[in-house]
Image (spheres, rainbow, N blue to C red):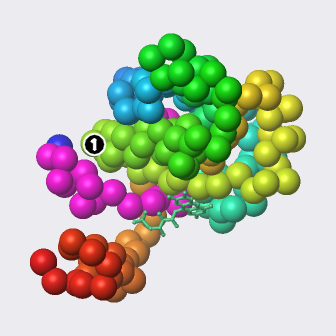
Amino acid sequence: MDLQDAIRTRRMVRTFDPARPVPAEALDRILRNGTRAPSAGFSQGQAWLVLQGADLEKFWIYGSDAVGPTVRTAPLVLVPFSCKRAYLDRYAQPDKGWTDRDEARWPVPFWHIDTGMAAMLQLLTAVDEGLGALYFGIVPPQVQPFREAFGVPDDHEPIGAIAIGYDAEEGKRDLRSKRRPIETMVHYGAWGTHEA
Ligand SMILES: Cc1cc2nc3c(=O)[nH]c(=O)nc-3n(C[C@H](O)[C@H](O)[C@H](O)COP(=O)(O)O)c2cc1C
């Protein structure tokens, strides 16, 4: 599939065909492409938990508060994690020199940005594999119970979850009318002008 087609046709899918599992090769490609994402200082402080079958039942105890019930039809959920410690370690190395590990040095949390970049690659790979996917949040009160249930290390933070499967939605949503006009989002040269 052409990149432009993948970007144009990607949309969040919230109902899946529960009878069709994600093929192993497709999952493998989704995961591998996630590891191709850029990362600050090449820190690569990302990890993913792959949940299918009985593991999914357990996931939904903690992961269902931000989505409707149809999302549970997904045969696969991927939970992406950011590891801030990996970034602080990497930037304390001699070529970076931030040995004080002061978090005030970070303009924004690069660890979450990088995990999000990987998630985007994974969403687009799902589209390219003919699959649908939904990125959604795990609500704050459920994060610690979720961590404990799956043995997640303390220094790994889930940034949400990605449900993946074959699209079984009826009646496609059309978000075109809701999309913000590009002129209100892009600023050429300085703020206050919308002209190219
Ligand atoms: C960081 C992030 C969090 C999101 N959280 C949820 C969520 O908790 N539940 C949900 O149904 N959709 C969630 N979405 C999906 C958005 O609602 C969706 O991307 C947006 O409405 C635009 O639709 P589209 O992605 O189909 O173009 C999330 C998307 C992002 C990027």
Q: Is residue 67 visible?
A: yes
Relative vertical location of residue 51 with respect to residue 173 in this rendering, above or below: above
Q: Which residue is mark 1?
A: 128
Mark 1 neighbour density, 10 Å: few (under 14) some (14–19) many (20 or more): many
- In the rendered image of this protein, does residue 184 appear above or below residue 4? below
Q: Quadrant of the N terminus?
A: top left
Marks counted in the figure total: 1
Considering depth in this image, is 45 or 179 the residue closer to the camera?
Answer: 45
Q: Position of residue 58 (x, y in %)?
A: 78, 38
Q: Which residues are magenta?
A: 2-24
Residue type for callout 1: Asp
Asked which secondary structure carries label 1, the reply is: helix
In the picture shown, does residue 182 fall above or below 162?
Answer: below
Quadrant where the C terminus lies? bottom left
Quick check: is 189 in the magenta stretch?
no
Q: Viewer-proximal residue, 144 or 55?
A: 144
| Residue 19 is a magenta residue | yes
Q: Say if residue 53 shows up in the picture.
A: no
Identify which residue is drawn at 50% across, 13% down. Answer: 94
Q: Is residue 42 left or right of residue 196?
A: right
Percent position (x, y) of residue 118? 43, 38
Decide if residue 62 is on the left or right side of residue 20: right
Residue 26, given in percent of the width and then of the height, sits at 38, 30
| Position of residue 195 in the picture relative to residue 166 (left or right) | left
- Assess mark 1: CB under 8 A from ligand 1? no
Classified by dominant secondary structure, the portion drawn in magenta counts as loop
Residue 69 x/y as whole percent: 68, 62
Describe residue 144's horizontal placement relative to residue 127 as left or right.
Answer: right
- The residue lying at 82 percent from left, 49 percent from top is 142
> Which residue is rendered at x = 69% and y = 62% of the image?
66
76 or 111, which lies in front? 111
At a point 66% along the width and 39% down the height, the residue shown is: 103
